[in-house]
Image (spheres, rainbow, N blue to C red):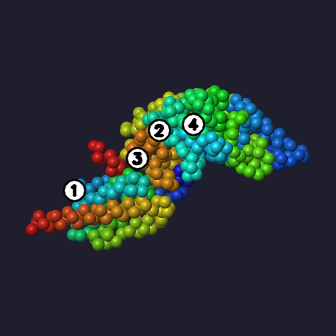
Amino acid sequence: MKRVYLDYAATTPTHPDVVTAMLPYLNDTFGNPSSIHSFGQEAKGAIEEARETIAALIGAKNDEIVFTSGGTEADNFAIKGVAYANEHRGNHIITNSIEHHAVIEPLKFLERRGFKVTYLPVDQYGMVDPQGVRKAVSEKTILISVMHANNEIGTIEPIAEIGRIAKEMGVYFHTDAAQTIGHIPIKVNELGVDLLAISAHKLYGPKGVGALYVRKGTKVAPFMHGGEQERRRRASTENVPGIVGFGKAMQIAQNEMGTEAERLTLLRGGLIEGLLERIDDIQLNGHPRKRLPNNVNVSVQFVEGESMLLNLDMEGIAASTGSACSSSSLEPSHVLLALGLPHEQAHGSLRFTLGRETTEEEIERVLEVLPPIVAKLRSMSPLLKSRV
Amino acid sequence: MAPNIRSLYSEKVMEHFKNPRNVGEIENPDGTGHVGNPVCGDIMELYIRVNDGVITDAKFKTFGCGAAIATSSMVTEMVKGKTIEEALEISNHAVAEALDGLPPIKMHCSVLAEEALKSAIDDYLNNSKGMDLESE
Ligand code: FES
C-alpha cells in the first residue's frame, strides 16, 4: 500500500537537492568556520552564502540573520532576548491565545519571573484583532508577538497591520513564521516586524536548523554565551551542513513558491469541499480564505480524533488531531478551544496538511477512506444517540 | 501529538480496536452504565443483560481513543458468563492485562471501562431492588 503523507505542517521530507547540497559538508568540507585555515574558510564561505540567500528572500540584510537550532530556539531567543535586554524599559508583553508552544512557554517562563503577559483573544476564525493589540499597549510594553500563520488551523494573521501599529507605538514586534516561510511571500519591511523566527524542516530543509531575523538596532540579549559565532549573539560552532541545506531549501522555495501555492490551494479546496459534501456534521476550522494554501482542519462531530487517526493510519494515511486523547497533556488543543469550540468538537478535529508530493489521487483517497471510518466510529458513539 | 500511534498499542489492542466486540445497545437492559472520563473528556456507555445473577450479554458505546474502544470491547467480553459478584472483581488492570498491556498514558481509559461496568452493575442492583419491592 502506498502511504499518503498529509502532515507537512509537522515536518516535510528533505528535498533531494537539499540532501545533495549538504553532503559535501558532512564529508570533505568539514572545517570549523571559526578556523582561519582553508578548511575553516570553505565552511565559513558556505554559511555566508546561505545567509545571503535567506536574507535576500525575506528582504533583510545579511547581518540581520542569526542561525539557530530551529524555530523553537528562534522564538525563545526573540522573546527572552528582548525581555532581558529591555527589562529596564518595561515588563509587559502582548501576545494571543493561539500561539505555538514555542512562544507560549517562554512567555510563561517570563511570567514566573515577574513579566506581565497579555493574551489577546482571537475571533471564531482564529484572527487577532489589530485594534485589540493597539488597545493593549501600555508604556510598559516592550514586545508584541503574533504568529504569521497558525500551525493547526492555518489562519493567516494581519501581521502587516499589527506591524504598523507596533511601529507607531514604538514597540518591538516578533512573528513566528515557521509555517509560512517558503510557502507564502515574506518581506520583513512589508510585514513591519523586528524579529522573525523561521525553521528549515518545514520547507523541505533539514531538521535542527532555523534562524531568527533581528532588525538592525533591535536590542536582544544573546541566546547562548560562549564563542564569537553569529556576531556574539548565538555562540556555538555552526551547524554547517544544516545551514547549507537551509539555504538550498530557501532557494528552491523561492523558485517554486508561487506555482506550488496555487496548486496546493486547489487541492485544499477540493479536499475541504469533498469532506463537507461527503460527511454530515462536519465543520471547517480556521479562516475560509485567509489560510495557508496547504491547511485543512475540520471537526467531525460525535467522534474522537485519535481513533480517526488510527483508522487512517491503518489505511496508510498520516494526518493529525487536536484531540485531548492524543496529546501527552490530555488537554485538547488550546487553539481550537480559543476559537470557542466546545471540548467535543476539539476532540473530533482532524488536520490534513498538504505538500510537494500531494496529488489529486491522494486527496481522492482520503475522501474515499474517511467517510466509512467516520460512519463506523459514529455507530459506536454514545453522543450520536442523544441527538436522534 | 502521539508518536507512531500504531506502535503505541499492542496487537491485541489494535485487534479489538479494529474489530470491536459487542458494539451497540441492549433493548431494555437490566443495567446501564454511563460514565464520563474526567481526564480527557470521553464517554462510555455499557449495557448488561442479567439472568439469574449471571451476565448473559453486554454491549457498549464509546466516544474515545483507541484504548477506550479496545478496553470497552474487552470488558464486555470478559463479563459475559460471569456472576455479578465475579464481574465486580474485574479491575481496570485485569482489562489492560487481557489486552497485553496499555501505554501508561492510556491506563486512565481502562479505568473508564471499569467504572462503566461498575455503574451498569449498580444500576442493575438498584433496578432489581425496585423489582423486588414491586413484586412484594
Ligand atoms: S479516551 Fe481519551 S485518552 Fe483514551
Q: Are marks 1 and 3 in contact (CB under 8 Å)?
A: no
Give left or right: position of B107 versus A150. left
Q: Are marks 4 and 2 in contact (CB under 8 Å)?
A: no
Mark 4 Cα-neighbour bin, 10 Å: few <14, some 14–19, many ≥20: few
Q: Are marks 3 and 2 in contact (CB under 8 Å)?
A: no
Q: Disc 2 on helix, strand or loop?
A: loop
- Position of residue A49 measured from the top left corner of the image (x, y, whole percent): 79, 36
Q: Is residue A365 visible?
A: no
At horizontal 37% and vertical 38% (from top left) the residue drawn is: A280
The disc placed on residue A121 is: 2
Residue B15 vs residue A270, the one in the foreground: A270
- Position of residue A323 measured from the top left corner of the image (x, y, whole percent): 46, 48
Residue B57 vs residue A78, the one in the foreground: A78
Q: CA distance from mark 3 to mark 4?
A: 37 Å
Q: Quadrant of the C terminus of chain A?
A: top left
List the residue tagged with mark 3: A343
Query: Which is more foreground, mark 4 or mark 1?
Result: 4
Q: CA distance from mark 3 to mark 2?
A: 18 Å
Query: Which is more foreground, mark 1 or mark 3?
Result: 3
The disc placed on residue A139 is: 4
List the residue tagged with mark 1: B28
Q: CA distance from mark 1 to mark 2?
A: 48 Å
Query: Which is more foreground, mark 3 or mark 4?
Result: 4
